[in-house]
Image (cartoon, helix red, strand yellow):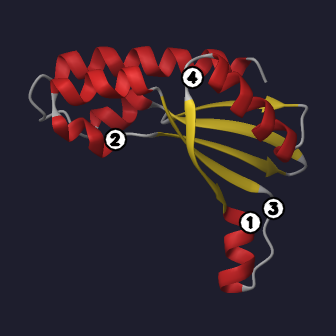
């Protein structure tokens, strides 16, 4: 599985707000917020369910990864999607370990893999708070 997905009782907007605060409390930051519903409406005149993509980063882990191999920046930041699916709100993490697995030819991959596991476990804990 490429994702870690959990359902929340919150609506998408409230889930994004709570997730953002919980990420901050756990040393993660939201670098960008992509409102897919709004983009599709503006650019294509298409109605779509609520769908927000968060680019998130833990500066300490990112810095360690870049010190190991500058190409680690190609898989930073981590992605979390918060979306409505048939009336239910879901939060999905694109697992950092899966993202890194596509770059197994990088030098010092084993060291990067440890950081990806640490990032993934930290993000799972935050998602489980929702």
**In this view of the protein, which residue sits in the foreground, 32 or 4?**
32
| Rendered image: mark on residue 78 | none
Marks 1,2: beta carbons within 8 A: no
Pointer 3 or 2: first along the chain: 3
In space, the residues marked 4 and 1 are separated at their CA atoms by: 24 Å
Numbered disc in front, either 3 or 2: 2
Image quarter in which the C terminus is found: top right
Secondary structure at numbered mark 4: helix
Pointer 1 or 2: first along the chain: 1
Marks 2,4: beta carbons within 8 A: no
Tell me the quarter of the picture where residue 110 sits. top left
Pointer 2 or 4: first along the chain: 2
Marks 1,3: beta carbons within 8 A: yes
| Rendered image: mark on residue 37 | 1
Pointer 4 or 1: first along the chain: 1
Q: At x 56% / y 32%, what residue is drawn?
A: 29
């Amino acid at each position: 599985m490429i994702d870690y997905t959990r359902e929340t009782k919150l609506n998408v907007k409230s889930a994004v707000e709570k997730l953002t605060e919980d990420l901050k409390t756990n040393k993660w930051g939201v670098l960008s917020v992509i409102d897919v519903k709004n983009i599709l409406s503006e650019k294509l005149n298409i109605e779509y369910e609520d769908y927000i993509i968060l680019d998130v980063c833990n500066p300490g882990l990112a810095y360690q990864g870049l010190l190991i191999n500058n190409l680690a920046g190609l898989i930073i930041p981590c992605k979390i999607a918060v979306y409505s699916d048939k009336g239910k709100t879901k939060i999905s993490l694109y697992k950092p370990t899966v993202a890194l697995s596509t770059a197994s030819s990088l030098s010092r991959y084993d060291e990067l893999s440890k950081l990806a596991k640490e990032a993934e476990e930290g993000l799972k804990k935050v998602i489980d708070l929702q």
